[in-house]
Every structure is written in structure tokens, then in C-alpha cells.
Image: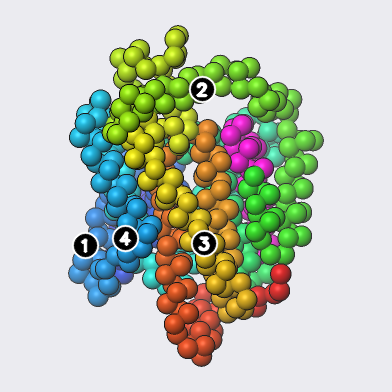
Amino acid sequence: MRDIALALFIFGMLPYILVRPYVGLLIWSWLGYMNPNRLCYGFAISFPWVHLVAIVTLLSLLFSKESKRIPWSTTSVLLMMFLLWTGLTTVFAVLPNAAWNKWEEFAKVLVMVFVTLVLVNSRERMHWLVWMIVVSLGFYGVKGGAFTILGGGVNHVLGPPSSFIADNNALALALCMTLPFMRYLQLHSARKFVRLGLALAMLLTGVAILGTYSRGGLIALTIVCGALFLKSRRRLAVAVIVVAVGLTASHFMPDKWVDRMGTLQDAQQTGSGVTRIQSYEFAANVALHRPLLGGGFNVYQSDSMWQQYGPPDAIPRAIHSIYFRVLGEQGFPGLFLFLALLFVSWRTCSRVRKQTRQIPEERWAFDLASMLQVSVVAFMTGGAFLPMGYFDLAYQLMALCAILELHVRQRASQPAEAHRHDSADMRLRSMATHKALPE
């Protein structure tokens, strides 16, 4: 039944996507983040839903009246440069077939990121894209939190099978990146029951991160909680949620969870810690010997490369760090572009915060920029221990940072009366904005 229901829904949405390509972007995001087909049992599991929706969305955009112009900015230029550079390193990759497969997958993600830059051209569209991210990944946060509480925290929380977030560590990172978006929506939802529901979702998502048993997830969650408190307005609500999650960790989680988290004090206490460090050494050695182009995508899958560049008695494995993985696969220029994207995204949001801090009508932009920064922090800290340098949510997040700054800049050139009309229109259409209170 799940397969049939999913098929009927997606095929039923195709006519709407053909008329409105933005709907296709939302459906693509839902499929990419939630992976609902992985919750099915039959033909829907392997059917290429994401590709189908992406193709229909691109066709719809091509023939629609929507602007086809990519809003060029530092972020969009860096994204294009990174895509081209990864393509160049793939040409000279150590494992050509594996590298081309990975590059095609990454290129498809960035194509839709550029579609995001083209189509998300208003406050309302940004708002609904954030909602789609929260619904898609928040589903696993709420579900995982309830599972952890009802099961006493004994079993690990995992993502949908055979998906990008199937691993407990990957799911923890994705949930940490989603928490700030939940907070943004909570601040700008007009209905009280929606705000209360989002507060509960944040609490359960925090518990779900604990339930993943991910040590990197715990580090990222701790930093995200601190960043949320510093960056958010109405900090009392954040403090209550943080305290509740902290009490859950200290008094509710079982001894085996405490023992596992205790190994953070010395990474070499565990085999996984040792092999992670070995993978960092391997990536660094590959980059030092191939500084310009690196080893190409999936270089860590080459046994001969491990024998040549790995430390003695190393156990081949994925490079569990976004920084070392990009370094080993894309060389020093690729790492520079990757770090530049993160830095520019942060600075873009800082400029938005500075421009909108004292403007009540733009408080939503101030809050969204703040939460985007917290999400960037989550990716940078949690990703330091995970091989998720090409996670699609991170790149769509970068696009949102650029889109937000462009929107604020355009509104700054409009008369104040137009701002008031736009704000009133947004409240009437989405019921998602309430009067901003002073910090």
C-alpha cells in the first residue's frame, strides 16, 4: 500500500510541477531528504523518483515564464567553480569508474542547487523550502526521539535504509543541521499550537541525536545548543529545551551510551577512533603527493593507494571528515574552494544580520540568517568526523544564504510602503509571521 500511495502522490503531482516548477523543487527536496521510498516494501524502493521529479522540474522551468537567470554572487560562482574543479579531478582520478559515478551524483545535486538559486526568489518561497526541510528530516527526529524514550535508549536510532542518512552518524549530523530551521519556524509561526509542536519536535530531535549513539553527533549537538542560545531571540524557550535534552542524556540514557560517549576523552581507546585517524593521515599523504588534483572521488576505495599512502598496518575505510575527504579527493585547490564556500556563507549571513537588526519588518530575515549560521556551524563541527563533504543539504543551505542576502538587498532598494505591503501579504497567505519582539 505504501508503494501505491507514494506512486499515486508523485504521479499526481507531476501536472502541478509542469505548471509550477517551484513545486517540483519542493518535491525533489522532500524525496532527497526524507527518502520516503526507502520506507516502502516493493517497487517504489528502487524506482528513480528523484530523477523523475528533477527532469520534470527542469522541463517545467525551461518552458515556464519563470526567470531562467542564475543570480550570480560569490556563492554561486564558488559553487560553479567547485563543480568544474571536481569534474577536472575526476578526469585524472585514481579510480575513474567510481569517481565518475560519484561526480555524476554530485553534479545532479548541484544542478538542483542552481535551480534553487533560480526559483527561490521570494520570502514566501524561502519559507516553504525551510518547511520542507524541517518536515522531511524532522520526521526522523520526532520518530527517533519517541523511539529512544519508549525504548529506554537501548537501541540505536538509524535513518532510512540505503539512503544518504542511513548511518547513525550521518542522521545525527542531518538532525543537528535541521534543529536551527525548526527554531526559525517556531519564531515565525502565527499559530500557538504550531509553535508548541515545533518546540516538542526540537526536544524529540535532540533526544533522537542522543539515541543515534553518534559521538560526533553529541559534539555537534552541544555546539548547536550553545549557538542556538547565543543566536536566537527569546532564549528562555531554547534554554528549557537544552536543559531537557541535557537531563535526558545524564539521567535517562543507559550505561552503554555513557560508556560510548566517554571514549571521546581519548579517541585511541576505540578501534573506530584509530581508523579515523589513519584515514586522515591517508588523505593528507595523498594530497601532499598529488597536491593539485588529489586522488579523485572515492580514492579511499583503492587498496594500492592505501598501501602507498596509508600509515603502517592501516585499515582501509572511508575518510571520516569533510575536510580531509575533500583534501584527499580534490587536492588543495578543492579544499580551498570548499572552505571558501563555508566562509562566504557565514559572512553573507553576518551581513544580513547587520543590515536587518534594527528593522522590525525584516526581523524574519535576521532570524533566518542567524539560524542558517547555526546550521553551517552544525555542518562544520559534525562534519569534522563524517565523510559527508558532498551532503546535498549543505549546498542547498549555502544557496539559501546567497538567496537571502540578495532578497534583503533588493528590498532595501524598495520604498518602505512596499515593505509593509509585502509583510502583510505574507501574513495573510502563509499565516507564518507574527509581530517581532525586541531582543
Q: Amino acid at mark 1?
A: Leu
Q: Residues within 10 Å of mark 1 (few under 14, many from 20)?
A: some
| Figure label count | 4
Q: Is residue 348 left or right of residue 187?
A: left
Residue 115, labelled with which disc? 4
Name the residue beneath numbered marker 1: 59
Mark 2 crowdedness (10 Å alpha carbons): few <14, some 14-19, many ≥20: some
Segment colored magenta: 194-222
The residue mark sitting in front, 2 or 1, is 2
Whichever of callouts 3 and 1 sits on the residue coming sooner in the sequence is 1
Q: Which mark is residue 277?
A: 2
Asked whether the residues under the numbered discs 2 and 1 touch, taking CB atoms below 8 Å apart as contact, a structural biologist would say no
Comes first in the chain, label 4 or label 2: 4
Q: Secondary structure beneath disc 1?
A: helix
Q: CA distance from mark 4 to mark 1?
A: 12 Å
Q: CA distance from mark 4 to mark 2?
A: 37 Å
* Nearest the eye: 221 or 143: 221
> For the residue marked with disc 3, what is the amino acid?
Cys
